[in-house]
Amino acid sequence: MENIKFFGKVFGYVLRGGCFIHIFQTHFYEFTETRGESMLPTLNSTYDFVYSSKYYRNGRGLEKGDCIVSLKPTDPDQRVCKRITGMPGDLILIDPSLQKAFNDDTELEEDDNFNKYIRVPKGHCWVTGDNLAHSLDSRSYNSLPLGLIKGKIIAANDFNKPFYENGIFYGFRKIKNNYIDEPE
């Protein structure tokens, strides 16, 4: 009888802990692995884990230059990490080599027969990977609805690094906004 009470108590604590972790990860912060080369050199292609703040969900409080986690517009079962390079109302120069992606349903803001520009619509943002040559981003699937944003990346751990080196655990680093607004 004593064993049953003990296991019941342990099960109760484990269940409460699991519920706490679920609520914390759903509503406050998420710790998740990233894979792929699109965000090199900011994030590694393997064994990099990011801390994502859910406060910024649905685009709340985000700025140009922030790194985000969002659902992929072409496959909502996948998540992507990208950097915001355009906010609603911004004018974006479309890469001439990718103009086929912006044909029928995209309203061009300006067209001088060589350069084509698109204005980021209200409720959307423009995202790109830091490694442009290996990134599927807004250049491929157009502007990203703010409602697909799941959080802002605030830090990362590199599990390719040793457990503890030079006062840092697993290559911990903050992910900063590196946007520089150039004067006109």
Image (spheres, helix red, strand yellow):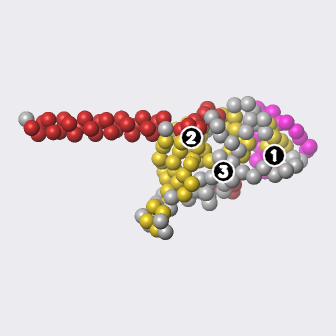
- Is disc 2 placed on a helix, strand or loop? strand
- Residue at horizontal 76%, vertical 47%? 98
Residue that protrudes farthest toward the left in the picture = 1
At horizontal 68% and vertical 45% (from top left) the residue drawn is: 84
Asked whether, in this view, residue 166 is left or right of residue 12, the answer is right
- Mark 3 highlights which residue? 177
* Residue 150 visible in the displayed image: no
Identity of the residue furthest to the right in this view? 112
Q: Which stretch appears magenta? A: 94-113
Q: Which residue is mark 2?
A: 151
**What kind of residue is marked 3?**
Asn
* CB under 8 Å between discs 3 and 2: no
**Mark closest to the chain's N terminus, 3 or 2:** 2
The 10 Å Cα crowd at callout 3, few under 14, some 14 to 19, many 20 or more, is some
Q: Which residue is mark 1?
A: 93
User: Judging from the image, what secondary structure is the residue with disc 3 in?
Assistant: loop
Residue 65: horizontal and vertical position, in percent? Answer: 69, 48
* Nearer-the-camera pick, 22 or 143: 22
**Residue type, label 1:** Leu
- Secondary structure beneath dot 1 equals strand
What x and y, as percent, mark residue 126?
71, 41
Please tell me whether residue 129 is drawn above or below residue 149 in the rendered image. Answer: below
In which quadrant will I find the N terminus?
A: top left
Indicate whether 31 appears above or below 55.
below
Q: Residue 152 vs residue 89: left or right?
A: left
Specify few, some or many for label 1: CA neighbours under 10 Å numbering under 14, 14-19, or 20 or more: some
In this view, the residue in front, 170 or 132, is 170
Specify the quadrant of the image occupied by residue 11: top left
75 in the magenta segment: no
Which dot, 1 or 3, sits closer to the camera? 3
